[in-house]
Image (spheres, rainbow, N blue to C red):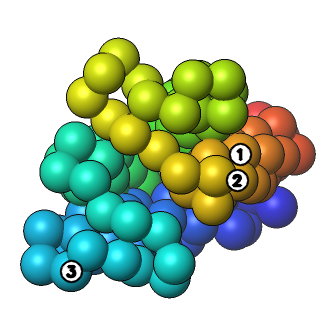
Amino acid sequence: MTLLLKPLVIVFSAIGIIAGVAGFFVSDIIGIETNPVGNVLYILVGIFGINASGSYAKARWFLILASLLFGILAILGFAQGTIFRYYATSQPENVLHAIVALVLLTVAFSSKKKV
């Protein structure tokens, strides 16, 4: 998994940036309604991810922090449907956030680099 860590961060970040930018122009991406707050969030996470992809340690910490962020979004989305009154989520988006959080966390903790 160690070899996959940095490429995964780059791919995940690029997808986030592309989806965030596209969300300003279309109202639905893969069956999930777009939201301006979510679009900005995905773009910012993508930018931080591209920035963190330069080193193994930064990439791993990015995956851990991003998984926590998306996990919290999933939990709040399932519980409330609207997060902090500004970010309305749907069930498909909550499921996507939960899956993303689990995948990122799994990769982060299963790729401990031997020094």
Q: Nearer the viewer, mark 1 or mark 2?
A: 2
- Picture layout, residue 111 above or below residue 83: below
Residue occupying the point 82% across, 37% down:
109
Answer yes or no: is residue 56 visible.
no
Which residue is under mark 3?
Answer: 26
Q: Is residue 85 left or right of residue 104?
A: left
- The local secondary structure at tag 3 comes to loop
Residue occupying the point 50% across, 82% down:
30
Q: Is residue 80 left or right of residue 109?
A: left
Query: Can you tell which quarter of the image residue 33 is in?
Result: bottom left
Answer yes or no: is residue 75 visible.
yes
Query: Can you tell which quarter of the image residue 19 is in?
Result: bottom left
Which residue is under mark 1?
Answer: 98
- Picture layout, residue 56 above or below residue 8: above
Q: Position of residue 35 (x, y in %)?
A: 26, 53
Amino acid type for the residue under numbered disc 2: Val
Residue nearest the observer in this picture, 90 or 15: 90
Which residue is under mark 2?
Answer: 95
Give yes or no for contact between labels 1 and 2 (Cβ–Cβ under 8 Å). yes
Give yes or no for contact between labels 3 and 2 (Cβ–Cβ under 8 Å). no
Residue occupying the point 53% across, 33% down:
81
Q: Position of residue 41 (x, y in %)?
A: 28, 43
Q: Position of residue 29 (x, y in %)?
A: 40, 79
